[in-house]
Image: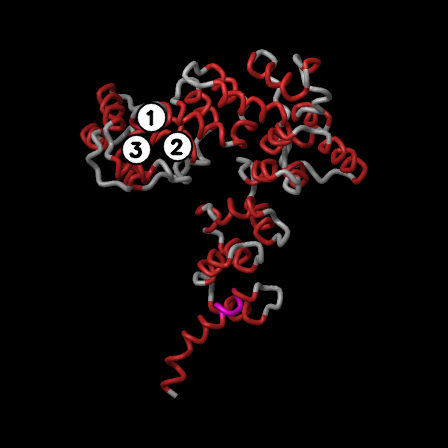
């Protein structure tokens, strides 16, 4: 769960007085929306049965102003988001917020897919990265009796083209026939190596602390990765180590490269390298500059300001948060976008204007 805010911690601590925990379970403690959801989630595991049941009841009755803010928060712990999706899967407005939140766990989305409405299922089906990263989402959508054929056919056709097999799912079998012909009913032609097979062949890919591969082995790995389906590359991006991610980050398919940047194993050093990469894909950079946690790292913010692939309005927003010494350096740096240079000069001129007037 990470570090809890002090105000949350003192109300959910098992050692806290029962009245204090009950007050939080009734949602009577003044907390920020995201902290409120975190507190209620934690109190559903309280030792006192009345506190647990009260927290569950309060969570179901939270006002829209709290839910609409918190359920979109990507910094909210995934277990909290998953717990709320389990409860709001039938409420389209809140289910949509949770499913569109990248921090919501894939397994919670899969559970919702089995019984959600058509509207929610359409949103789930549009998130191609989730579908390939967690194939059980496709399986559960196919089991949802409320969904019409066209929606399921579209999801399954995409899955088949991307390398998903799911041999036990009839709708996927039908999709293979549509996409590849009757001879592919049981399995697609030459699906390529799986992520698990690649990791078995190159055991060091499962070890984040493994030393860099020697050149010959690196070449054969690159060749093997080229033969993988999109779905299996995405799984490797999630399971593999930094060396695997470095290959996949350069993949031409944006779903694969975005899967890398969203990997739970991604390191701060890799994020900084992406922020500095002038050839990084737009979709990958968008994930970086929209993640508040990463923007707390000053070098990342500085690198994004200098990167010409970052939209000017975004770069200018970061420019205003830089030290004056860095802003001065940007005005002289020929590798910085002209729009950023111009804005940097304006900032310095504005700051120095009063001093000139006094002289």
Task: Specify the segment rendered in magenta.
Answer: 340-344
Q: Quadrant of the rendered structure where residue 169 is?
A: top right
> Horizontal placement of 206 versus 73: left or right?
right
* Most foreground residue, 140 or 154: 154
Q: Which mark is residue 192?
A: none
Instruction: Tell me, yes or no, whether the two marked residues, 3 and 2, touch with CB atoms within 8 Å.
Output: no
The reply to whether the magenta stretch includes residue 282 is no
- Per the image, the residue denoted by label 2 is 98
Nearest to N terminus: mark 1 or mark 3: 3
* Most foreground residue, 80 or 139: 139
Q: How is the image coloured?
A: secondary structure
The reply to whether the magenta stretch includes residue 341 is yes
Nearest to N terminus: mark 3 or mark 2: 3
- Per the image, the residue denoted by label 3 is 39
Q: Secondary structure at mark 2?
A: helix
Q: Which mark is residue 88?
A: 1
Q: Position of residue 134 (x, y in %)?
A: 53, 25
């Amino acid at each position: 769960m990470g570090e809890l805010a002090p105000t949350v911690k003192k109300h959910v601590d098992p050692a806290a007085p029962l009245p204090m925990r009950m007050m939080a379970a009734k949602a009577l403690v003044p907390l920020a929306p995201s902290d409120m959801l975190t507190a209620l989630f934690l109190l559903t595991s309280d030792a006192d049965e009345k506190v647990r049941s009260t927290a569950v009841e309060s969570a179901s009755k939270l006002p829209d102003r709290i839910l609409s803010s918190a359920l979109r928060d990507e910094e909210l712990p995934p277990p909290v988001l998953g717990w709320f999706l389990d409860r709001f899967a039938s409420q389209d407005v809140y289910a949509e917020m949770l499913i569109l939140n990248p921090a919501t766990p894939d397994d919670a989305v899969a559970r919702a897919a089995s019984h959600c409405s058509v509207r929610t299922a359409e949103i789930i089906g549009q998130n191609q990265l989730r579908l390939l990263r967690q194939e059980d989402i496709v399986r559960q959508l196919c089991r949802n009796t409320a969904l019409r054929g066209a929606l399921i056919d579209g999801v399954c056709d995409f899955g088949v083209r991307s390398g998903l097999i799911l041999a036990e799912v009839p709708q996927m079998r039908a999709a293979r026939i549509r996409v590849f012909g009757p001879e592919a009913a049981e399995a697609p032609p030459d699906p390529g190596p799986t992520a698990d097979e690649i990791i078995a062949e190159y055991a060091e890919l499962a070890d984040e602390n493994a030393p860099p591969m020697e050149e010959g082995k690196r070449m054969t790995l690159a060749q093997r990765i080229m033969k993988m389906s999109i779905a299996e590359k995405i799984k490797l991006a999630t399971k593999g180590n930094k060396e695997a991610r470095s290959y996949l980050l350069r993949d031409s398919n944006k779903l694969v490269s975005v899967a890398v940047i969203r990997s739970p194993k991604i390191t701060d050093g890799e994020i900084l390298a992406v922020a500095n990469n002038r050839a990084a894909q737009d979709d990958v950079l968008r994930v970086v500059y929209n993640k508040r946690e990463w923007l707390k790292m000053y070098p990342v913010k500085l690198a994004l300001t200098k990167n010409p692939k970052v939209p000017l309005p975004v770069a200018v927003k970061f420019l205003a948060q830089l030290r004056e010494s860095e802003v001065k350096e940007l005005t002289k740096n020929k590798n910085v976008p002209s729009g950023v240079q111009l804005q940097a000069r304006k900032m310095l001129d504005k700051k120095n204007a009063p001093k000139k007037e006094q002289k």
